[in-house]
Amino acid sequence: MAEGSFEPKIVAFLCNWCTYTGADLAGTSRIQYPPNVRIIRLMCSGSVDPTYVLKPLLDGADGVLIGGCHPGDCHYQSGNYKARRRVIALKEILKNAGVDEDRVWLRWVSASEGGRFAETVTEMVEFLKEKGPNPKRREWAV
Amino acid sequence: MESQPRIGVYICHCGVNISATVDVEQVAEFAATLPGVVVARNYLYMCSDPGQSLIQQDIEEQGLNRVVVASCSPRMHEPTFQGAAQQAGLNPYLVEMANIREQCSWVHSDRGQATEKAKALVASVVAKAARLNPLEEREVGVTPGAVVIGGGIAGMVAALDVADTGFPVYLVEKSDHLGGRVMELNRTFPTLESVAELLQPLIERVQNHPNVTVFLNSHVTGVEGYVGNFTVEVSGSPNLQPETMKPETHELGVGSIIVATGYDVFDPHRRPELGYGQYPNVITSLELERRLAEGDLTVDGRSPKSVAFIKCVGSRDVQVGNPYCSRVCCMTTAKQSRLVRELLPEADVTVFYMDVRTFGKGAEEFYDEARAKGVRYRRGNVSEIIRGDGGDRGGRGDRSGRLVLVGEDTLQGRPFDFEADLVVLAVGMECRSDVGELSTLLKLPRSSDGFFLELHPKLRPVDTAVDGVYLAGCCQGPKDISDTVAQAKAAASSAMIPLIRGTVLAESATAVVDPDVCAGCGMCVEVCPYGAPALDPLWGVSRINDVLCKGCGTCAVTCPSKAIRLQHFTAEQILAQVDALLCV
């Protein structure tokens, strides 16, 4: 990281069928976006356990991105709806626990939306740069 | 799993696709320092035979029990490396891939940052690999048969190949007849064969084939399932005349789906400066096909003295959103200009072109013949077509009110006015306006031009991101009849692979319940979309039927006592990935 500039770290959980494939399409289409995002492949956004979101935030990631299929398009019929409900509940809990819930993004990106994936990452990086580093990074540092 | 993890890490250069942006040697050196890694190498093409042998040799000689390949997307080559590991005696589920091409080298340009990201991705996947467990491969039966969507030449050819092999085929056509766009043509290029003679026997064979059920005026309304076992919902009626039809819903069980939905013709109204719809003697190449079939080219009862063709209307044109070449218009124009010349030996026939692209067998020769027969090719852009006003008001053209093509000769670098009695616009191809519906139903990705996206442009040209769904013809991109038929036959043979095998691999990465932890609350039963978990009445705990389980993992997240584990994506593995990512 260059001196003085803050480069946010984003952990992304992407569903295998839509958003992960959308990110692949951004690649095959050579659409450039900031390298701040680190992707973990899951089969479904509905399999994102709340601990997957909590752990990176408490360990100092600046943001968590969950990517799933558009409503109605889930490969497993309804996993994305479950993800949506869980993220809403989780954000409420984060707020009450004093963790900035705006650092958690849930976005629908289909397998054909490479451009949308790149835009989402770009937008999130800009948003987090404005927000500044996750304070948990210092608080929890041993 | 036996003893300690012994991980081999293989960083692929992918030619220069990865190594141009990512310092692969540095990544390999870094990987060698990660816990559990015993060997880390980089190689030019990991997917090549020598690349795969490298892995196999290390498995045997170094006693590797986990393999990590950092290269392209696992959606591309995971089966390749799983297969290689399996040949060397390693369970395929002990292989993981780090996606450092699609999700790193191709989307970032800063070498330092891309290398750091690649390291983090490799570390994350190595951490997961160390915690992998072997899984059993399972096979399930296949429903024999295929649905072909679209009754044009691609759909019919594909349907016949599958049907001739002995499988039932359901051919679903939106309109009230078979034949598709080719039906609108008069003669083929470069052989000048009659299209009717080509198409009619094909249509008859399809209609009379005992294994083919034709649905006319029908469309696909729903698709469920996966390769080997799809349920396709079709609204319409099989083999009935349109007037007696009462649309009803049919559920068709098949193993494969072939998409052959064709294309839309570019609407020249979107180039208003060319006067289509304004002047009756400005027509499209398809309208000319009909006029040629009728043998009548007269304009207002008179034989035209000058016929002009304009190529690339709606193709290679960023203004209308179609930067691509439609591939058929150069030869269509060569064919039509030649036929017009034969029909009207007295008339001037002029073709305005950007470039002439007459690839394909016999095509360049055909184009040479057209010129030898007196068709004039003039390199130029026509920017506007106006009706001559006889020069009365200082305007253009003679007194007869002929059309005047205004443009620039791009060889001479000079503007021109060119008079014509009949103008033919060589209109290009576009993806169908309703392509989005099918794309959503089948979850089929599309490329930036709107057409359906093949899985790999060279090696998997008829496969798609959805296993068991194949592409034939112009729904994948503009093509002539020869290429369409070739692709249709390719799609048919690919679609028959699961049908002939009779089995497909079932999901191995299913969810499992730890009966010692399960409290029998039944929440997994409620959230599962497939009815896989059920409460064991005797023990009061949940059991998951691994034939029904598709491995989505929603039960594992829902389980309040964390008794359910999604194999291959366990919480332990994922959290280890998070840890490793944040440590780099």
Image: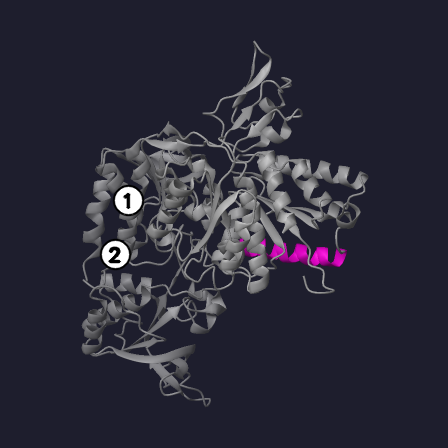
Q: Amino acid at mark 1?
A: Ala
Q: Tag on residue B565?
A: none
Above-or-below relation of B331 to B407: above
Q: Residues within 10 Å of mark 2 (few under 14, many from 20)?
A: some
In the shown orientation, is residue B251 left or right of residue B543?
Answer: left
Residue B495 % position (x, y)? 32, 41
Residue at image coords 35%, 55%? B458
Magenta part, dominant SS: helix
Residue A79 % position (x, y)? 58, 35
Is residue B179 in view from this perspective? no
Of B439 and B262, the residue lying toward us: B439
Q: Quadrant of residue B563?
A: top right
Span of residues in magenta: A113-131
Q: Name the chain under label 1.
A: B
Secondary element under disc 2, as helix, strand or loop, is helix
Of the image marks 2 and 1, the number of the one nearer the N terminus:
1
Above-or-below relation of B373 to A19: below
Q: Tag on residue B158?
A: 1
Of B256 and B3, the residue lying toward us: B3
Above-or-below relation of B357 to B79: below
Q: Tag on residue B482?
A: 2
Q: Name the chain under label 2.
A: B
Is residue B142 in view from this perspective? yes
